[in-house]
Amino acid sequence: DGGITQSPKYLFRKEGQNVTLSCEQNLNHDAMYWYRQDPGQGLRLIYYSQIVNDFQKGDIAEGYSVSREKKESFPLTVTSAQKNPTAFYLCASSIGQNTDTQYFGPGTRLTVL
Amino acid sequence: QQQVKQSPQSLIVQKGGISIINCAYENTAFDYFPWYQQFPGKGPALLIAIRPDVSEKKEGRFTISFNKSAKQFSLHIMDSQPGDSATYFCAASKSGGSNYKLTFGKGTLLTVNP
């Protein structure tokens, strides 16, 4: 089956700890994205990557970091600098340049205690 | 600055009725307007999308109407069913340069009563 996988589905961490969320795709897509979803706020872009070894900040990048060492993987680290990390995190991918359709993974719900 | 404004926040419709969700955008460079459907605890899924060279696009019970001069677009769900109950997001993007960046509305929670 082709698609985007995110793991784990639920994640709990203590305040002050860094945590890494996994995102893998086997769609052979060049571009990948991370969004944060909060109730009533829609989806806000954290980081995106157009090609391997390149990524750009989105609208709310502070307190987050990413890497893109492989085409199929785009992990997101939520650092202790993120002031309000509890949220639903969504990873997405698209074929690449000049293709707008983004396909989303099932999401990871992060709760910081 | 909210570039895509979506209304209403929530909508309750009877089975068989028409659901209408509206979005307005500010950036005239936007040229791609998708609608996503999201069920609780799941990721959004592309429902239907339109480009400004047409004023309407229909796929089954779902229709996008687009008004370029008013900078507005809307989603119409005909013969609404309880299975359509979900959160719907409109979005917009522009091609070229950072064309990857979709700007989303804040979502509409649709409830279709049986």
Image (spheres, rainbow, N blue to C red):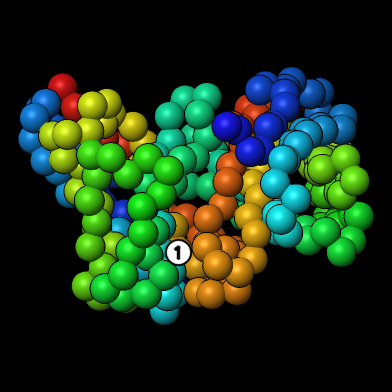
Question: Total number of numbered labels?
Answer: 1
Q: Is residue B11 left or right of residue B37?
A: right
Above-or-below relation of B106 to B28:
above
Q: Residue under mark 1: which chain is it in?
A: A
Neighbour tally class for label 1: few under 14, some 14-19, many 20 plus, Cα within 10 Å:
many
Determine if residue B83 is in view.
no
Q: Is residue A79 left or right of residue A108?
A: left
Above-or-below relation of A97 to A35:
below
Q: Position of residue A100 (x, y in %)?
A: 60, 65
Q: Position of residue B30 (x, y in %)?
A: 70, 54
For label 1, the residue is A93
User: Is the C terminus of chain A in the top left, top right, bottom left or bottom right quadrant?
Assistant: top left
Say what secondary structure mark 1 lies in.
strand
Answer with the quarter of the image where residue B50 lies: bottom right
Q: Residue at x 58, y 46 (%)?
A: B103
Front residue (pair A16, B35): A16
